[in-house]
Amino acid sequence: MLLTRYVARRLLLTIPLLIGITLVLFLLYNLIPVDPVAVLIPESGFRDPELTAQTIERWGLDRSLPEQYMIYILNLLRGDLGISFITRQPVMDDLLTRLPATLELTVCAMLFAIVVGIPAGLIAGLRRGGWFDRVTWLGTLITASIPPFWLGLIYLTVFWYDLRIAVGPGQIGSRMNRPEVVTGFITLDSLIAGDLNAFRSGLAHLVLPTLVLGGFTLAVVLRLTRAAIIEEMRREYIRTARSKGLRERTIVVRHGLRNVLLPLVTLLGLTFAGLIGGAVMTETVFNWPGLGQYLVQASINLDYPAIQGGTLLVATAYLLVNLLVDVLYGILDPRVRDDG
């Protein structure tokens, strides 16, 4: 019962935040000093008064701002994010087409950060001051300090252009046929289609962008794990466990790691949502056909409905993942839901 009330409270708090995001996006859209009619109408038809009037009426540009905002909200509730100025397709369709590519890259980047970051952080923390601790500290410092687009260019130059040990930009080899879309994940769709060559190509194209996008998250996960395990190993219950004669590995895995995972849940949840929004530069550098590349193209071409829709999707992802993290934290630590 307490968990149900806790989840309901967190869900209710998410609703006003989502409304606030839509209001901010709407106001920013109307504050931009560009005439949307000039973008909506082709140059050849801009001098046609009838076409101009039809466009203004269709997009509700002749109404007051409150009325336009209500139209915007009603359209959102119907899943209508408008029509892209560039593709002339519904923005929702464009986003749903691009979303799987971003999720595939994001999931791979997150798995890379977890699989490498947590064990490395544990080893660095348990062997504090050793050579491994110093090497990982230097590596995470460098990785976290270099901007993703610059790191991506370095990786492409070194591993693809110079050493020829990695594949170049894109999601799959240019000479390969893309498998039929089932999940939108190029690797999974290749396996479903039984095309191992396409699977190997898609997996190879994931390596460099995964290293770039997951590099910063890896640094954060490693540092947090290291700091948390150092703090946990100083606690009284750890000394008690040692005095009972338990093996050090048992103490670390069954006692220390369990408490280290609590702050990691929050970090990983928020980082996953951040990776979706942070894929913009990585996807652009590696020509990855995801949301990031779509938003960059929309910004260059002043495609306001696409910018609004993409930004709203990323912001909604933040809220939903934050809600999920709160729920998971409440399940793992009953004290949180009792107090909240």
Image (cartoon, helix red, strand yellow):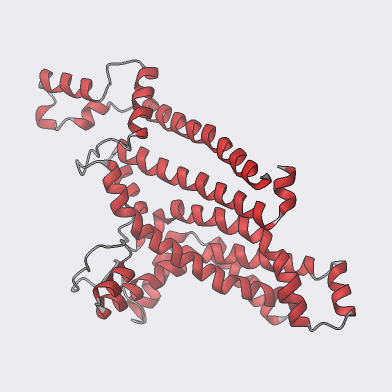
At a point 55% along the width and 51% down the height, the residue shown is 324
Q: Quadrant of residue 88?
A: top left
Q: Position of residue 228 (x, y in %)?
A: 73, 65
| Quadrant assignment for the C terminus | top right
**Side (left or right) of 336 relative to 297:** right
At a point 28% along the width and 72% down the height, the residue shown is 192
| Quadrant assignment for the N terminus | top right
Q: Is residue 19 above or below residue 134?
A: above
Q: Count up the numbered dots.
A: 0
Q: Quadrant of residue 188?
A: bottom left
Q: Position of residue 223 (x, y in %)?
A: 66, 65
At a point 85% along the width and 69% down the height, the residue shown is 237
Q: Is residue 262 above or below residue 94?
A: below
Q: Is residue 200 visible?
A: yes
Q: Nearer the viewer, residue 337 or 85?
A: 337
Residue most toward the front?
1
Q: Is residue 201 above or below residue 236?
A: below
Q: Position of residue 325 (x, y in %)?
A: 59, 52
Q: Position of residue 111 (x, y in %)?
A: 50, 68
**Side (left or right) of 101 relative to 256:** left
At a point 48% along the width and 31% down the height, the residue shown is 19
Q: Is residue 32 visible?
A: no
